[in-house]
Amino acid sequence: MEIIHTHKSYWKANDYPYIRVVEISESELQELIAQLSRIDIIEWLMWNDRNGIYSDESSIREFGQVMTIEEGTEIMLRQAEENRVIKNLTVI
């Protein structure tokens, strides 16, 4: 039996581009993440790092369990900060 997810994506429902995550302040990012579900966080992580292991299926296959919302939040904050730093680097 196939499980069908009926989750409505925060990103699509609010017309919120994924890239905007790295353009907002740290406090705005914290507020945004507080509104996101675990699935929304996974959706952003999968967009941001196509080679990562974030989907439930991949996580179970690789680690034997799904990623928790706390783990996803930590990874999302770290990746957003790393992308923010890279975006703000200037070439001299």
Image: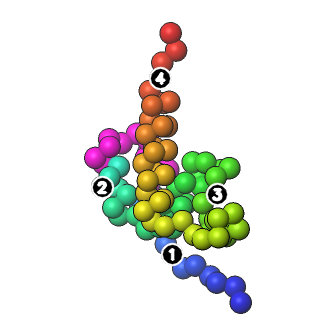
Which dot, 3 or 4, sits closer to the camera?
3
Label 3 secondary element: loop
Q: Which residue is the site of mark 2?
A: 31
Main secondary structure type of the part rendered in magenta: helix
CA gap between label 4 and label 2 equals 25 Å
Q: Which residue is the site of mark 1?
A: 7
User: Which numbered disc flags the more N-terminal residue, 3 or 2?
Assistant: 2
User: Which numbered disc flags the more N-terminal residue, 1 or 3?
Assistant: 1
The kind of residue on which mark 1 rests is: His
What residue appears at the point 42 percent right and 48 percent down from the top-left corner? 77
The kind of residue on which mark 2 rests is: Glu
- Observer-nearest residue: 15 or 58? 58
Q: Magenta segment: does it hold 27?
A: yes
Q: Is residue 10 visible?
A: no
Q: Is residue 3 left or right of residue 81?
A: right
User: Which numbered disc flags the more N-terminal residue, 1 or 2?
Assistant: 1
User: Which numbered disc flags the more N-terminal residue, 4 or 2?
Assistant: 2
Q: Residues within 10 Å of mark 2 (few under 14, many from 20)?
A: few
Q: How many numbered discs sit on the rendered protein? A: 4
CA gap between label 1 and label 4 equals 37 Å
CA gap between label 3 and label 4 equals 27 Å
The kind of residue on which mark 3 rests is: Ile
Tag 1 near tag 3, CB within 8 Å = no
CA gap between label 1 and label 3 equals 20 Å
Q: Which residue is the site of mark 4?
A: 89
Q: Which residue is the site of mark 3?
A: 53
Quadrant assignment, res 64: bottom right
